[in-house]
Image: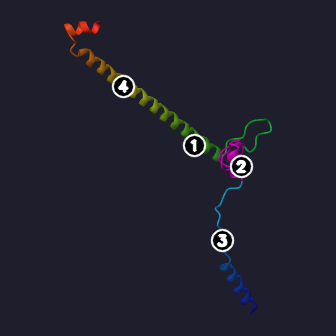
Amino acid sequence: MAASLKMLGTSALRHCVRSFTSTHVTCAGKKWRLENGLPWTGSEYGPMTDLPDWSYADGRPAPLLKGQVRRRKQREVFARRALYLNAEVDQGIDTWMMKKKVKERAKEQLKSSMLKPKGNLLIQKKE
C-alpha cells in the first residue's frame, strides 16, 4: 500500500508541475555580442567555430572537420552568388545607360530633322 501511495504521489507531481513564464526565451549574452559586433549566437562564426581544435606537434594544421568544410562551402556559395548578382546589377545599369543614350540620340536627331525657320524669321532670330 505504501508503494502504491508513493507511485500515486510521484505521478501526481509529474502532472501538476508546469513551468509558466510571461517572458520570451533569449540567448544568454546576445545583447552584449550584438553591441560588440559579434554574431548573435556564439556558434555562427569566429575563432571557436572557424579555427581547428588541435594541430600536430610539428606545426602542421589539423584536417578540417565536417562542420568547418560545410561552413566553408556555404560561404563560398554565398560569395559566388553575391558576385553573380553584383555583375547582374552592373549589366542592368549598363543596359539602362545605353538605352538612355539611344533615346537621347533619337531625340537630337528628331530635333535636327525638324523644319528650320526661313526668310525673315531666320534673320530676326540671329539679331
Relative to 22, say whether 111 is above or below: above
Mark 2, residue position: 32
Q: Which residue is drawn at 78% across and 35% down?
A: 59
Q: State which region is magenta.
A: 29-51
Identify the residue at the far bottom of this view. Answer: 1
Tag nearer the camera, 2 or 1: 2
Looking at the rendered structure, which numbered label has been put on residue 74?
A: 1
Type of amino acid at the residue the image marks with label 1 = Gln
Q: In which quarter of the image is the N terminus?
A: bottom right
Tag nearer the camera, 1 or 4: 4
Type of amino acid at the residue the image marks with label 3 = Phe
Tag nearer the camera, 3 or 1: 3
Identify the residue at the far left of this view. Answer: 119
Q: Where is residue 20 in the image (x, y as percent from the top left)?
A: 65, 71
State which quadrant residue 4 falls in. Answer: bottom right
Query: Which label's residue is closer to the chain start, 3 or 2?
Result: 3
Mark 3, residue position: 20
Query: Which label's residue is closer to the chain start, 2 or 1?
Result: 2
Q: Observer-nearest residue: 109 or 30?
A: 109
Query: Which label's residue is closer to the chain start, 4 or 2?
Result: 2
Q: In which quarter of the image is the C terminus?
A: top left
Type of amino acid at the residue the image marks with label 2 = Trp
Type of amino acid at the residue the image marks with label 4 = Lys
Q: What element carries label 4?
A: helix
Q: Residue at x 55, y 40 (%)?
A: 78
Q: How far apart are marks 3 and 1 (CA)?
A: 39 Å
State which quadrant residue 7 falls in. Answer: bottom right
Looking at the rendered structure, which numbered label has been put on residue 100?
A: 4
Q: Residue at x 48, y 35 (%)?
A: 85
